[in-house]
Image: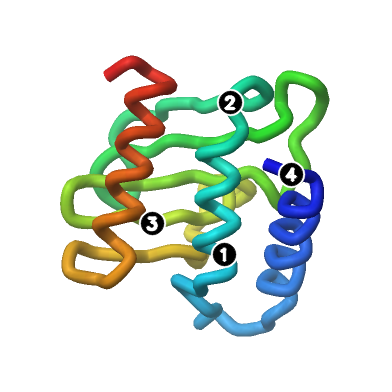
């Protein structure tokens, strides 16, 4: 992920966090596009942690970009819950409490098929599944 894209994602999360409402925006194209870049373009300098059964549904994975060369910026740490029917992306900085999702898609939603396919291909590359 290019530095300008990382900066854009950090800024997006800052602005999203500044919204003082539990009903924060979900599934915005800007975030989805930047999230694709985050997990598809960073292959050498990130940690990907498989957490097993998720607390929301299905399985859960945590992404820590830039973790190999230093500490990951808090706005770039994400958890992804997924199964064949749903995918949700939320901040990994939740300390075990519920956190609103940046992405919450279910089968039948316009972006679901493309995102779940890219995510499963990513997991195949990382874990060799």
Q: Position of residue 36 (x, y in %)?
A: 51, 50
The residue identified by callout 3 is 88
Label 1 CA crowd tier, 10 Å (few <14, some 14–19, many 20+): some
Residue receiving disc 2: 43
Where residue 88 appears, x then y in whole percent? Answer: 38, 56
**4 in relation to 126, above or below:** below
Q: Give how far apart the Cα atoms at labels 1 and 2 are.
A: 20 Å
Name the element at disc 3. strand
Q: Position of residue 69 (x, y in %)?
A: 80, 21
Q: In percent of the image, x 57 and y 64: which residue is there?
A: 31
Quarter of the image with the N terminus in it: top right
Of residue 99 and residue 35, the one placed in the foreground of this image is: 35
Label located before the other in sequence (2 or 4):
4
Is residue 103 placed above or below 93 in the rendered structure? Answer: below
Rounded to the nearest angstrom, the CA distance separating label 1 from label 3 is 13 Å
User: Mark 1 sits on what residue?
Assistant: 31
* Mark 4 Cα-neighbour bin, 10 Å: few <14, some 14–19, many ≥20: few
Point out the tag, 1 or 3, that comes first from the N-terminus.
1
Label 2–label 4 contact, CB within 8 A: no
- Residue furthest to the top in view is 128
């Amino acid at each position: 992920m290019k530095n300008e894209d990382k900066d854009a994602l950090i800024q997006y999360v800052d602005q999203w966090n500044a919204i003082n409402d539990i009903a924060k925006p979900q599934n915005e194209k800007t975030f989805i596009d930047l999230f694709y870049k985050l997990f598809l373009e960073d292959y050498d300098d990130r940690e990907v942690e498989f957490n097993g059964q998720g607390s929301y549904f299905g399985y859960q994975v945590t992404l820590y970009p830039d973790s190999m060369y230093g500490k990951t910026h808090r706005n770039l740490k994400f958890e992804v819950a997924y199964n064949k029917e749903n995918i949700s992306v939320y901040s990994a900085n939740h300390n075990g409490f519920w956190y609103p999702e940046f992405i919450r898609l279910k089968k039948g939603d316009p972006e679901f098929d493309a995102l779940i396919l890219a995510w499963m291909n990513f997991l195949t590359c990382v874990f060799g599944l």
